Image (cartoon, coloured by chain):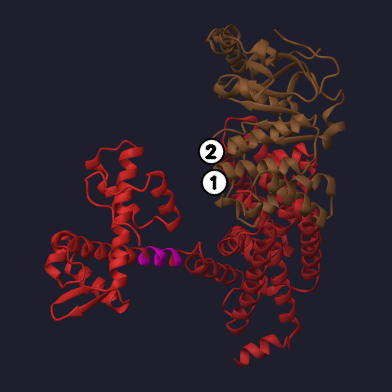
Chain colours: A red, B brown
Amino acid sequence: METLIEFLSFEYPNIKYVVFGTILLSISSAVVGCFTFIKKKSLVGDVISHAVLPGICISFMVSGSKDPFLLIIGAFISGWISIMVMDAIIQNTKIKEDAATGLSLSVFFGIGILLMTYIQHSGNASQSGLDTFLFGKAAALVGKDLLAFSIIAVIVLLTVLIFYKEFKLISFDPQFAKVIGLPIKRLEMILTSITVLAVVTGIQAVGVVLMAAMLITPAAAARFWTNRLSRMILLASIFGAFSGISGAFISYSAPSMPTGPWMVMILSIIALISFFLAPRRGILIRQWRRFSIRKQLLEENLLKAFYRIGENSGEYFSGVAVDDIRLIRNFSPAQLAKGLRKLRVNGYVERSNDSWLLTNEGFEKGKRITRLHRLWELYLTKYLRIAPDHVHEDADTIEHVITPELEARLEKLLEYPTSDPHLSNIPRNN
Amino acid sequence: MIHQVENPALEIHDLTVSYDKKPVLWGIDLSIPKGALCGIIGPNGAGKSTLIKAIMDLVDMNSGYVKLFDQSLDEVRSRVSYVPQRESVDWDFPASVLDVVLMGRYSSLGLFKNPRKADKEAALKALEMVGMEKYYKRQISQLSGGQQQRVFLARALTQNADIYFLDEPFAGVDAATEKAIFKILQDLSKEGKTIIVVHHDLQSVETYFEWVILLNLRLVASGPTKEIFTPSLLEETYGGKLTLLSEVGELVQKGEFKAREKQ
């Protein structure tokens, strides 16, 4: 706790730089990443981040300095060329997008590694530290780097703000965008440029290899929580910023811990949480829905069995033994115990000694399910011309799905029938 | 049988288009009168969609030109509306119905501006016309095929255009939607708007369209439905007599010839 307070009070200016820098980096890559994500070009970030390496090396070889602005210019140019090469391959050869992506990435990265090795062995004293681009150096962000990043991050964010609705349209329906007269080539160029810029700054923090995660993970996580692009971008930025602060804090409290990889770790955890917990799209909620449907099926099937027994004996409200129920439908003992308990708790059945009795509500519900089952069987035979001996299984599922509105329509369509294809009576509602 | 008209809404002159270097439309020459409700008819792979895309400047032409109201597309863009095929976009995109319909207003908005209240009203009105006003908040991935098509039409309606191009608006939609869409197109046509529809269901051609274009790699016929929609011309459109033409097309593709040498 003390460390946290110390950290947040920004006692050391260096921490302020690092925190501020990582937040800016993360937000700009998260925002740009949203667009690459919805355009289904998630791997583009990976290509650019690997392809900036030769640019950085050449820029260093030409200028002889590690001035961040010069390196960024070099990185920007080679990142751009890699995208143009990739698009040219797709357009002019039979090679498909995935292969062109891989080609562009590996060729540029290969050249980058080659140049970097050459520089490292050239005996140039000022080269040390250039390899931080490979793995990032978020914890070592200093004044001039920070200035460069801040400028770029602001450029990136402003551009998205200005062109938000145009970017949205070219991501969703580029053909329509072109027909209504948007300059889509120029807009694509701007979008690619800010993607390259975001990547160029981002790799300073997390390095070439992890950069793709900085772009895509916040967007992918945010997509789970919302169906609106604006909210998705906002959420992704928050996730990005949070990962920036946490990464910086972790490496502050445990100096042996690297900032960049931790940022990616935090993002991954956020993505995992979203994956499981998000409303509607999350895994857990879907599992829960499946579970409750299974419960509903069991209960309704039991009530249907009660109703059938009553139908056979003519006595709907007399006691029913567990074995009688199993004669109607082969429930497992565990299912029976669980389902009956639940039905009793909900007031659909009552227990007396060893037998079970339907309550009035249980009777109505069992009747309705039976009714829906038979209505559906009749519908299948009448309108889908399915043989009467083939309709039972299907009706067993559909009876649980039909809503009261559909029920009314079904009844009307079948002209208020009284018996199903097997000549069983279709019970009426009161 | 190609009827040329005076003062046309759409004029296509000597249009040749290649797709992936293979010529798919050869020397199309036609004109459509203003206010016509016109169907483009032809078998699968006849180049119906390509023709519309060429008119919309979405594919490169090898030769020829297209004029709308006697002007180039760039000069009359604000009077032109295009409804792409429903499958051409990803409906899982994070957007609501209203978001998509509002896109029709983007061109009149210009850069830097967000949709205004008036744009939202126009979008809602268009949604009402297609019977989707209740769904304006709905996420687009939750729409049925017919509803998606209605949303696309609503987006086009917000543009208040004079000529509409629709690519297979009746493909894979329910009967109610087909009826609703046709009604809207008919009303637009009565207002004097020109409607051009790629269509593949021969059954409904005579009831739907007053003008037809019969297409199969080349233009077979273009003119009033009563004169053009005849068994012999349909036979010519759908009969497999053109294997030679497609084989030549494939040769052009393999040899990477230009479909037209530069003059």
Q: Is residue A304 magenta?
A: no
Q: In the drawing, what numbered circle is on residue A157?
A: none
Q: Residue at image x 52%, y 10%? A: B240
Position of B209 compared to B72: left or right? left
Furthest-front residue in view?
A: A430
Mark yes or no: residue B116 visible. Answer: no
Q: Which residue is mark 2?
A: B174
Quarter of the image with the N terminus of chain A in it:
bottom right
The boundaries of the magenta stretch are A285-292
* Residue at mark 1: chain: B
Q: Secondary structure at mark 2?
A: loop
Q: Which mark is residue B144?
A: 1
Q: Position of residue A406 (x, y in %)?
A: 43, 52
Residue drawn at point x = 58 percent, y = 15 percent = B250
Q: Is residue B88 above or below residue A294?
A: above
Q: Is residue A392 above or below residue A357?
A: above
Q: Residue A308 at x, y = what percent?
A: 20, 60
Name the dominant secondary structure of the magenta segment: helix
The secondary element bearing badge 1 is classed as loop
Question: How far is mark 2 from mark 1, CA to CA?
Answer: 9 Å
Q: Quadrant of residue A381?
A: top left
Residue reaching furthest to the bottom: A2
State yes or no: discs 2 and 1 in contact (Cβ < 8 Å).
Answer: yes
Quarter occupied by the C terminus of chain A: bottom left
Amino acid at dot 1: Ser
Residue at the spot x=31%, y=66% of the render?
A: A364
Circle 1 crowding by C-alpha within 10 Å: few under 14, some 14–19, many from 20: few
| B58 relative position to B146: left or right | right
